[in-house]
Image (cartoon, helix red, strand yellow):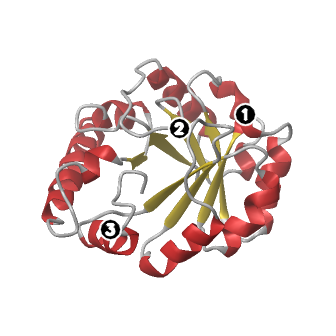
């Protein structure tokens, strides 16, 4: 939602879902952990009635534990917290799950894959940042592909998603899927060129990314 029209969030959410989005990804930033400031719990609560699919709330905030309950009550279906955002990620994941929502851990580009080795049983998803968190529209960091492969190998047969956030386009989607990702976040690449008055552009963008990703799956 970071790339949506901030004056028209409800209509934007309805438009992307109607055009094929599987999830709605909400980037929460605090101006401290990352150099940007976005959505507090009241904003997320306002989004919730418009979301008919799945609301994925990515907390780029520190400290994080004190805000988990508020975002869960605002209507998050999944909350992801950064490995680097606090001293006790195991406790953070426990706190998320205690709210009855799905839990994910996020790794920044410089954070090694091995960081998640001992917490995978608490995770529904590992989010691998393929740009530095804080702003949309950044270029994909290719060195993250090896991290995706390593995390996929560690997950094994556990029912844990690998999500990619940052620089996802028709060019990079096949690369991350081939490496083992199965949930792709796209902001600029979805909203570019469209609007609530021209939502069919969102649909074309979503289909193009999906087709590129599915092509890599079939090749594998």
Q: Which residue extends farthest top? A: 143
Q: Nearer the viewer, mark 3 or mark 1?
A: 3
- Judging from the image, what secondary structure is the residue with disc 2 in? loop
Q: Earlier in the sequence, mark 2 or mark 3?
A: 3
Where residue 1 sits: x, y (%)? 42, 57
Residue pointed to by mark 2: 134
Disc on the earlier residue, 3 or 1: 3
Residue at 21% across / 58% down in the picture? 202
Callout 3: 10 Å neighbours few (<14), some, many (20+)?
many
Report how far apart the C-alphas of labels 3 and 1 lie in the structure: 31 Å
Q: Secondary structure at mark 3?
A: helix
Residue 117 image point, x, y percent: 72, 33
Apparent side of residue 130 relative to residue 12 in the rendered image (left or right): right
Quick one: label 2 or label 1, which is nearer the N terminus?
1
The label on residue 12 is: 3
Q: Residue at (65%, 23%) from the top-left corner?
A: 112
SS at mark 1 in the image: helix
User: Disc 1 marks which residue?
Assistant: 84
């Amino acid at each position: 939602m970071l790339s949506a029209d901030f004056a028209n969030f409800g209509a934007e959410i309805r438009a992307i879902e109607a055009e094929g989005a599987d999830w709605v990804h909400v980037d929460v930033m605090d101006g401290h952990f990352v150099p940007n400031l976005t959505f507090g719990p009241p904003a997320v609560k306002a989004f919730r009635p418009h979301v008919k699919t799945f609301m994925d709330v990515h907390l780029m905030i520190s400290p994080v534990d004190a805000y988990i309950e508020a975002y869960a009550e605002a209507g998050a279906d999944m909350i992801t917290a950064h490995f680097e955002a606090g001293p006790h990620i195991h406790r953070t994941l426990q706190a998320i799950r205690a709210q009855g929502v799905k839990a994910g851990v996020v790794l920044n580009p410089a954070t090694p894959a091995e960081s998640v080795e001992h917490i995978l049983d608490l995770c529904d998803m590992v989010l691998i940042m393929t740009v530095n968190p804080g702003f949309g529209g950044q270029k994909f960091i290719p060195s993250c592909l090896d991290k995706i492969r390593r995390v996929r190998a560690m997950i094994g047969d556990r029912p844990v998603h690998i999500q990619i956030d940052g620089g996802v386009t028709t060019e990079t989607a096949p690369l991350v899927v081939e490496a083992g990702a199965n949930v792709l976040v796209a902001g600029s690449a979805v909203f570019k060129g469209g609007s609530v008055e021209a939502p069919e552009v969102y649909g074309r963008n979503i289909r193009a990314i999906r087709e590129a990703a599915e092509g890599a799956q079939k090749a594998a």
